Amino acid sequence: MSESYNGWTNWDTWNASLWLNNEEDVYSYFQKIARYLDPHNYSDIEELADVLEQELPELTLGDDYDPGKVNWMEVAQDFIE
């Protein structure tokens, strides 16, 4: 049985991406990082995924999602594109 949610791996991944794209300060911060990355370069996607995994949970103010369940590579790929 698939846990996918709205085209994402799961609810936690969808929620992390939604939050990232809807919080202006957070979006701008990660956009500054992403502008130098190539969406077709696996290493660049992996680098952003690592940054998101380390920093995004610290920037949130609630327990709306489980960062351990987030597919950070998927979030990074979508954000870079």
Image (cartoon, rainbow, N blue to C red):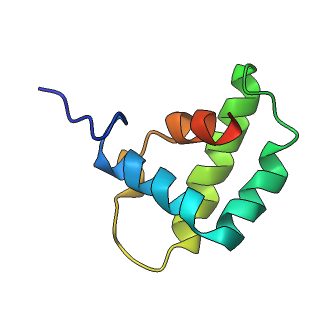
Answer with the quarter of the image where residue 49 lies: top right
Residue 78 lies, with reference to residue 43, above or below; the image says below
Please state the horizontal and vertical placement of residue 64, each as a whole percent of the image: 34, 68
Instruction: Identify the residue at horizontal 56%, vertical 59% (top origin).
Output: 20
Examine the rendered structure and indicate whether residue 29 appears above or below residue 38.
below
> In the drawing, does residue 70 fall left or right of residue 29?
left
Q: Residue 71 is drawn in which quadrant?
A: top left
Question: Residue reaching furthest right?
Answer: 36
Residue visible at 83% across and 54% down? 32
Q: Residue furthest left?
A: 1
Task: Pick the residue in front: 68 or 39.
Answer: 39
Provide residue 45's location: percent of width, then percent of height: 68, 32
Count of numbered badges drawn on the protein: 0
**Residue 81: % across, % down:** 68, 33
Q: Quadrant of the N terminus?
A: top left
Residue sitting nearer the eye, 48 or 79 = 79
Q: Position of residue 59 (x, y in %)?
A: 58, 72
**In the rendered image, the vertical position of residue 34 relative to residue 66, given as above or below:** above
Which residue corresponds to the image point at 35% horizontal and 47% vertical from the top-left?
A: 69
Dividing the picture into quadrants, the one containing residue 25 is: bottom right
On screen, residue 71 versus residue 38, left or right, reads left
* Residue positioned 35% across, 51% down in the render: 12
What residue occupies the far bottom of the structure in this picture?
Answer: 61
